[in-house]
Image (cartoon, rainbow, N blue to C red):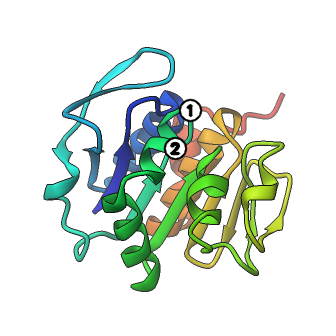
């Protein structure tokens, strides 16, 4: 089970594109409402969630995904249920994935990136406390997966598929959605 956490003001593409690619790969994904059953993104797109955060089964989780966007990232970080879930997944060795502002504000704020390679939205690297910042669309370091923002959302989604289903499945999904097409 993959849980994608949505709080008011999340970046729509950073949540929906990875969830879509994971579902195409056959992974069970649930959009989790942190601030309500219907959550509006930073560009006014309202998304109906699958369940409220209180109903998520963190023992059954394989991965938690934290989209960026403002004020969505700050709203996620301000909710102790989110940080408790992220810490549990991290400590249990499950995948923790964050994109855009989330690696800096949430993972960096929680001290989970110390000594790890990571990326985030350009200019927010200072919040990735102790991380080794890289300027890439997506970075995988153990069970931590980070991405730079909307422009890296498909690479991020493919990395999530690769982590859970293998590299070959991720390549097939990328080809199916015409990602990485030679020009």
Q: Residue furthest bottom?
A: 92
Q: Quadrant of the N terminus?
A: bottom left
Residues under numbered marks 2 and 1 in contact, where contact means CB atoms less than 8 Å apart: yes
Q: Is residue 142 above or below residue 182?
A: below
Residue displayed at 78% across by 74% down: 130
State the CA–CA distance, disc 2 to disc 1.
7 Å
* Placement of 137 over or under 36, stated as above or below: below
Residue furthest left in the image: 55
Q: Which of these two is toward me, 162 or 119?
A: 119
Q: Residue at x 61, y 63 (%)?
A: 109
* Residue pictured at 44% horizontal, 67% vertical: 164
Asked whether the viewer can see residue 56, the reply is yes
Question: Is residue 171 among what the camera can see?
Answer: no
Quarter containing the C terminus:
top right
Element carrying mark 1: loop
Q: SS at mark 2?
A: helix
Quarter where residue 75 is shown = top left
Q: Residue furthest top?
A: 44
Q: How many numbered marks, from 0 up?
A: 2
Q: Quadrant of residue 131?
A: bottom right
Query: Dot 2, how many residues are within 10 Å of its Cα: few (below 14), some (14-19), or many (20+)?
Result: some
Which percent across, then down, holds residue 43?
A: 50, 17
Q: Which residue is mark 1?
A: 70
Residue 170 pos. (x, y %): 54, 55
Q: Position of residue 115 (x, y in %)?
A: 76, 81
Q: Is residue 181 left or right of residue 44?
A: right
Residue 127 shows which numbered tag?
none
In the drawing, what numbered circle is on residue 74? 2
Question: Callout 1: 10 Å neighbours few (<14), some, many (20+)?
Answer: some
């Amino acid at each position: 089970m993959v849980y994608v956490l949505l709080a008011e003001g999340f970046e729509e593409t950073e949540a929906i594109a990875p969830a879509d690619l994971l579902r195409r790969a056959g992974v069970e994904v649930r959009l989790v409402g942190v601030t309500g059953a219907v959550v509006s993104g930073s560009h006014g797109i309202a998304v109906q969630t699958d369940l409220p955060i209180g109903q998520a089964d963190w023992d059954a989780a394989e991965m938690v995904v934290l989209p960026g966007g403002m004020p969505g990232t700050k709203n996620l970080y301000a909710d102790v249920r989110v940080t408790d879930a992220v810490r549990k997944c991290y400590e249990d060795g499950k995948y923790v994935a964050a994109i855009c502002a989330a690696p800096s504000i949430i993972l960096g704020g929680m001290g989970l990136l110390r000594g790890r390679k990571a990326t985030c939205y350009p200019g927010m690297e200072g919040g990735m406390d102790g991380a080794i910042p890289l300027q890439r669309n997506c970075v995988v370091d153990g069970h931590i997966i980070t991405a730079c923002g909307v422009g890296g959302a498909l690479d991020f989604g493919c990395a999530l598929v690769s982590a859970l289903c293998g590299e070959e499945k991720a390549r097939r999904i990328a080809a199916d959605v015409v990602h990485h097409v030679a020009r």
